Amino acid sequence: MEEEEKKPDEKTEEKKTEEKPEDKSEDSKDGDKPKTTPLIDIANAAAERMEKANVETAKLLDRQEALEERRALGGRTEAGQETKPKEETNADYTKKAMAGDLNE
């Protein structure tokens, strides 16, 4: 019987310990100051990300320039290609005739 009586006491003890909010804040000598990241650290992190992005952009720009060079020196020309004359509609012909520009 004594064991049965101890069990309820243990349960209430566990409940009491669970209900107490644990104070996880460390005792720092700064008082009530909130822990924040200094602006310098934030700025340094941003600068580091920008430097990495600049390096990546420079690599991509080099690749794009090399591609443009290959296209320019690739040997393709416009010579020898046929150009189709613009087809005139009846309205265009009428406008030219009224303006006296049929010889063009």
Image (tube, rainbow, N blue to C red):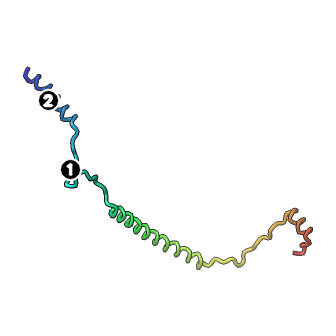
Quadrant of the snapshot with the N terminus: top left
Q: On the image, numbered disc 1 is attached to which residue?
A: 26
Q: Residue furthest left?
A: 2
**Residue located 40% across and 69% down the image:** 51
**Residue located 33% across and 64% down the image:** 40
In this rendering, the answer to whether 38 lies above or below 103 is: above
Query: Residue 15 placed where, x, y %?
Result: 20, 31
- Left or right: residue 62 versus residue 103 is left
Q: Which mark is residue 10?
A: 2
Quadrant of the snapshot with the C terminus: bottom right
Q: Quadrant of residue 96?
A: bottom right
The amino acid type found where label 1 is placed reads: Glu
State yes or no: discs 1 and 2 in contact (Cβ < 8 Å).
no
In this rendering, the answer to whether 54 lies above or below 22 is: below
- Left or right: residue 91 versus residue 65 is right
**Residue located 86% across and 65% down the image:** 92
The amino acid type found where label 2 is placed reads: Glu
Q: Between residues 20 and 14, which one lies in front from this camera angle?
A: 20
**Residue located 35% across and 65% down the image:** 44
Query: Residue 93 placed where, x, y %?
Result: 88, 66
Query: Residue 78 placed where, x, y %?
Result: 69, 76
- Left or right: residue 26 versus residue 98 is left
